Amino acid sequence: MLTRARNIGFAACLMLPFGACVDPGGRDALERSSPVGETGSNVLSISEDDTIHWNGNSVSLEELPALLKTAAARDPEPELRFEPSAQSSYEVSVQVLRAIRESGVTKFGFVGNEKHTTPSNKTN
């Protein structure tokens, strides 16, 4: 997959057959709005300041449903790995989880939970 044009503004994209996404305004939006990350899965994370990231690129809550639905429609469906920061707000996490549920994504999992485990709550 092509990887360039990081951190550009999101715009409505036209998905081309070879997986690239071109901004109708003329800027490439490759990878940023790609429905599949480089590993064949997508990582959706929420940072400590409640910024939502899709495969490492920040997206708004309004942009997220289109990305999720595009990914869910792919065959085979890529795995969605959700990794909220322990310091992200409950409210944003719930909104993101609601968007995931409403998108039709079926291959979903939480990742990174082991980072939030302390010695007192680990089981042997």
Image (cartoon, helix red, strand yellow):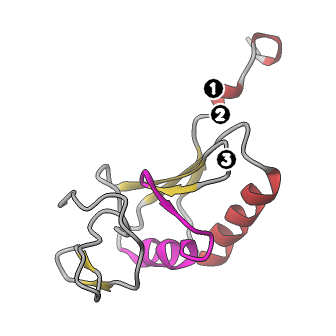
Per the rendering, the mark at residue 48 is none
Q: Which residue is depicted at the point 25% across and 62% down?
A: 5
Q: Earlier in the sequence, mark 1 or mark 3?
A: 3
* Frontmost residue, 91 versus 51: 51
The residue under the point 61% across, 45% down is: 47
Element assignment for label 1: helix
x and y percentages locating residue 48 in the rendered image: 66, 42
Q: Identify residue for label 3.
A: 49
Residue 8 spot, x, y in % from top left? 35, 66
Residue 113: mark in rendering: 2
Q: Where, by quadrant of the figure, is residue 13 drawn?
A: bottom left
118 vs 64, left or right, is: right
Which residue is at the front of the view, 53 or 79? 53
Is 104 placed above or below 34 here?
Answer: below
Residue at the location (74% across, 59% down)?
92
- Residue 10 point in image, percent of width and height: 42, 74
Magenta highlight range? 55-74
Q: Which residue is mark 1?
A: 115
Name the amino acid, label 3.
Asp
Amino acid carrying label 2: it is Asn
Contact between labelled residues 1 and 2, with CB atoms less than 8 Å apart: yes
Label 2 and label 1: CA atoms lie apart by 5 Å
